[in-house]
Each structure stands twice: as C-alpha cells, then as structure tokens.
C-alpha cells in the first residue's frame, strides 16, 4: 500500500463521497466511555462508531470477521492509504491459492476498496470493499469492511494513532 499526497487524498475522498449516498451512516446517541475521536467496533452488532465526545457517535454498518476469525481488544491506526494495492495474507492465500500475489489498487477485484486504515495489530485493516453485499455480515478474516463511501468519510475523520476498540 502506498500513501497519497494531501491533495490526491482530498480529491479521491471527495469523488468517492459524491459517488454514492451516505444513507448507511447516521448520527446516534453514544454513552459508552470513550474519548472523542476513538473508533469503537461492536462485532455482534456489525457496527463501527466514531465517537464525537458530546454523547454522540457516527454509526456505520460493517462486515466483521467470520467465526474463528474475530478478535477483540485495542489497536491503533498505523497507516492511511487510498486505493491501496492488496497482497493476500498467508492464511487467505492458503485458503484461496488461485489468488494473485498482488491485486492493484483501483482494480474491481481488489477487496480493499477505495481506502484502508491499517491497524498495528497483525494484518488487519478497516477498509472499503468490492463486495458491498457483505456489509452487515460475518465475512472477513478479521478485517473490518465498510461501504466505500463510509470508509472515505471515516478516512477524513481519523489520524494515524487513532485508538480502535473492538468488542464482542
């Protein structure tokens, strides 16, 4: 994955946000103890919350890890990437040996979608998807999938170092 310049990032994020409705995300009451700017993923709900710090959060539907692939705990965002190339992790490659070693960013077959926020915990990321029908399900190897317009919105709200809390 490679980082984009600020101008390129703003252009891609703006174009993606204009490309589809943002109806999936919504402002909701959020009373859990979390600092403003924290990302909270509730696996059982298949929802991601961006905490505003005023008793509200922006709630996004997501796909989460399938049975045996879920994790819980704390992580930090350690990278922000637009139109990232994707190299399947070893476990994914073992299960799907026909996958190429790399799928170019922007390719319709790239499962990372328009943006990825990598986490400092293994090979996990919060990312867009080329399979929007998977949102709301248990579908991944541990990554958090979002609609492309939603990951573009979240991309603009978070920084490298943002805390991510994943709960059941």
Image (cartoon, rainbow, N blue to C red):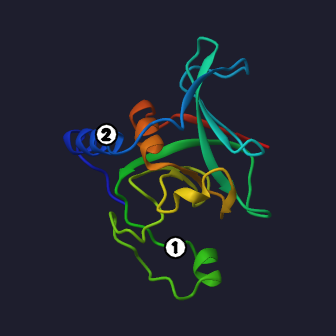
Residue 129 relative to residue 167: left or right? left
Residue 6 relative to residue 26: left or right? left
Position of the N terminus by quadrant: bottom left
Q: Relative to the observer, which residue lies in front, 77 or 103? A: 103
26 relative to 53, above or below: below
Query: In the rendering, at what x and y percent does residue 79 appear?
Result: 43, 47
Residue under the point 54% across and 38% down: 24
User: Which residue position is annotated with label 2?
Assistant: 18
Residue 20, which numbered label? none
User: Reading the chain from its start, which is encountered first: label 2 or label 1?
Assistant: 2
Residue 103 relative to residue 42: left or right? left
Residue under the point 45% across and 33% down: 158
161 relative to 100, above or below: above
Query: In the rendering, at what x and y percent does residue 46 appear?
Result: 69, 45
User: Which residue position is annotated with label 1?
Assistant: 88
Residue under the point 59% across and 11% down: 54
Residue 161 relative to residue 40: left or right? left
143 relative to 52, above or below: below
Mark 2 vs mark 1: in front: 2
Query: In the rendering, at what x and y percent does residue 155 appear?
Result: 42, 39
């Amino acid at each position: 994955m490679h980082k984009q310049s600020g101008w390129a990032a703003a252009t891609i994020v703006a174009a993606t946000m204009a490309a589809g409705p943002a109806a999936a995300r919504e402002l909701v009451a959020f009373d859990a103890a979390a600092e403003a700017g924290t990302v909270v993923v509730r696996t059982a709900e298949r929802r991601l919350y961006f905490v505003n710090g005023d008793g509200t959060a922006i709630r996004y539907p997501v796909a989460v890890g399938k049975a045996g692939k879920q994790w819980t705990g704390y992580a930090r965002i350690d990278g922000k990437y637009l139109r990232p190339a994707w190299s399947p992790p070893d476990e994914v490659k073992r299960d799907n040996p026909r996958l190429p070693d790399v799928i170019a960013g922007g390719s319709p077959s790239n499962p990372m979608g328009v943006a990825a926020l990598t986490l400092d915990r293994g090979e996990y990321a919060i990312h867009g998807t080329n399979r929007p029908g998977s949102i709301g399900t248990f579908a991944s190897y541990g990554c958090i999938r979002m609609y492309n317009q939603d990951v573009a919105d979240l991309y603009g709200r978070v920084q490298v170092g943002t805390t991510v809390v994943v709960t059941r």
